[in-house]
Image (cartoon, helix red, strand yellow):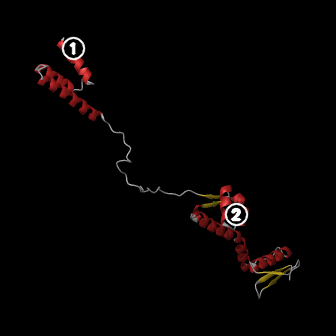
Amino acid sequence: MVAGGFGYDNAKSKVQINGRWIHSFARLFANEVELRSSEAQNPSADVPADAESERSELQEVPIMKLENKKQLASRVFNVGKSRIVFNTSRLSEIKEAITKQDMKDLKEAGAIIIKEKKGRKKIEKRKTRRRAGSIKKKVNKRKQNYVKLTRKLRKHLKNLKQKNNISSKDYKELRKEIRTSAFRSLNQMKERMKETKK
């Protein structure tokens, strides 16, 4: 029994503090207290190897707690543990988090940061098939307009020739001009024919 209401039962591996028996980390905690009290009484004494190893185990306990918190965060946010980063200035808040909602609140507050994925972005497959109605493409209608106008002008010339209203020479010349897109409309070709008759 040590002064201050503290005792250790080696047979049962538990600690008594102020009349209450506590089992968690009992052996490590008791050895650490005994080690520190012996160092205070005799600072020049050598520290045993087994006591030194147990001290290192006791110092690693907070790290293990953070590993458990990181594992909990990875399950909550459905990401790998390597992508989870804790804000070092808010470790005390992270240690107190025990529920999924606590982890979500800490993430919104900036205490937990999730790193972006590394590597090439995966090309996603189209969910729907491209059909004629879904393709938005600007169609060039220049040739289509040319064909429509040319057929219209040639038809008018053919009717004039059948009625003998135009000579063969003028007919051939106008056909060449129609082919080179010299006329933008039927009225323009009629004006051209009036000028030639004068």
Q: Which amino acid does label 1 sit on?
A: Glu
User: Which numbered marker is on residue 195?
Assistant: 1
Q: Position of residue 72 (x, y in %)?
A: 63, 68
Which residue is outermost to the front? 163
User: Which numbered marker is on residue 23?
Assistant: none
Circle 2 sits in a helix, a strand or a loop, which is it? helix
* Snapshot quadrant of residue 127: bottom left
Q: Where is residue 1 in the image (x, y as percent from the top left)?
A: 86, 83
Would residue 30 be found to the left or right of residue 57 on screen? Answer: right
Residue at left 65%, top 70%? Answer: 68
Residue 36 higher or lower than 101, as above or below: below
Residue 193 higher or lower than 66, as above or below: above
Sequence-first tag of 1 and 2: 2
Asked whether 26 or 191 is in front, the reply is: 191
Would residue 75 be found to the left or right of residue 8 on screen? Answer: left
Q: Which amino acid does label 2 sit on?
A: Ile
Q: Position of residue 15 (x, y in %)?
A: 80, 81
What's the CA distance linking mark 1 and mark 2? 94 Å
Asked whether 60 or 160 is in front, the reply is: 160
Circle 1 sits in a helix, a strand or a loop, which is it? helix
Q: Where is residue 78 in the image (x, y as percent from the top left)?
A: 57, 64
* Snapshot quadrant of residue 22: bottom right
Residue at left 37%, top 42%? Answer: 137
Please tell me how crowded label 1 is: few (under 14), some (14-19), or many (20+) other residues with Cα within 10 Å.
Answer: few
To which residue does mark 2 refer? Answer: 94
Asked whether 22 or 108 is in front, the reply is: 108
Would residue 44 be found to the left or right of residue 150 on screen? Answer: right
